[in-house]
Amino acid sequence: MTFEGNHKVRRKIYQVIDGMTDEEFNRKPSEHDWSPKQILEHLALMETYIAAKIAAELKNKESRRASKKLIVLSGNLMMKDDLPEATKPTDSFKKVSEMKEELHNSRIYLLDVYDGSCKDMDNLREKSLEHPNLGLMPLEQWFPVVGMYEKCHLKMLKKTINELRIHGLASELNTDAK
């Protein structure tokens, strides 16, 4: 059950944003923080990026073998400046429904890469891809890493939404006080 954890986290993400308006979804708690939309956009972009890297590495005859890593450590979030350019979210406005569709499409792509690789499971064990914190990691470990990465961002998403609600409540109180 490679994807059970991934699907569970994704469902929780959808639950957390359930009921948000498109305006709330695109609002940042501060100038330097990401909006809920940007967090989800980053997750969709990262999942697509990882799936593409795995697909390319499966075709790479020179791919090296790597030992399995303790992937619970991979939950550490990278600094926003260290992110691959292709995974950085935009400032453009998107509806909640649009982002859900993008997340769905990125998941389908990852599943397609996995399904295509299942014909030769040795490739997933014998080939590797560089992880920014852990070094070379077998391809088979990258699929659950996506879910762990999303789990870290789920915490970030909850914190962001709470900050937006606090700021929104403070704004309402300030308006009512006048």
Image (spheres, grey):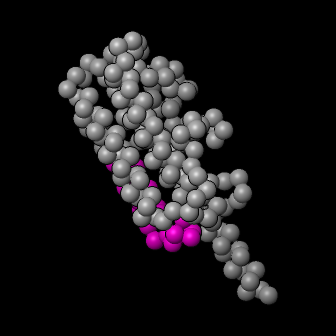
Q: Quadrant of residue 145?
A: top left
Does residue 80 appear anywhere in the picture? yes
| Location of residue 174 with respect to 39 vertically, above or below | below
For the point 76% across and 80% down, which residue is it?
174
For the point 61% across and 69% down, which residue is it?
165
Horizontally, residue 109 falls left or right of residue 26, namely left
Quarter of the image with the N terminus is: top left
> Which stretch did the figure color magenta?
7-25
| Location of residue 140 with respect to 11 vertically, above or below | above
Whether residue 164 is in magenta: the answer is no
Q: Quadrant of residue 11?
A: bottom left
Quarter of the image with the C terminus is: bottom right
| Location of residue 177 with respect to 171 vertically, above or below | below
Horizontally, residue 102 falls left or right of residue 159, namely left
For the point 53% across and 39% down, which residue is it?
86
Observer-nearest residue: 104 or 68?
A: 104
Does residue 158 appear anywhere in the picture? no
Observer-nearest residue: 61 or 124?
A: 61
Q: Give coordinates of residue 76: x percent, y percent.
A: 56, 36
Q: Give coordinates of residue 98: x percent, y percent.
A: 43, 61
Q: Give coordinates of residue 25: x percent, y percent.
A: 54, 65
Q: Give coordinates of residue 170: x percent, y percent.
A: 71, 74
Q: How many marks?
A: 0
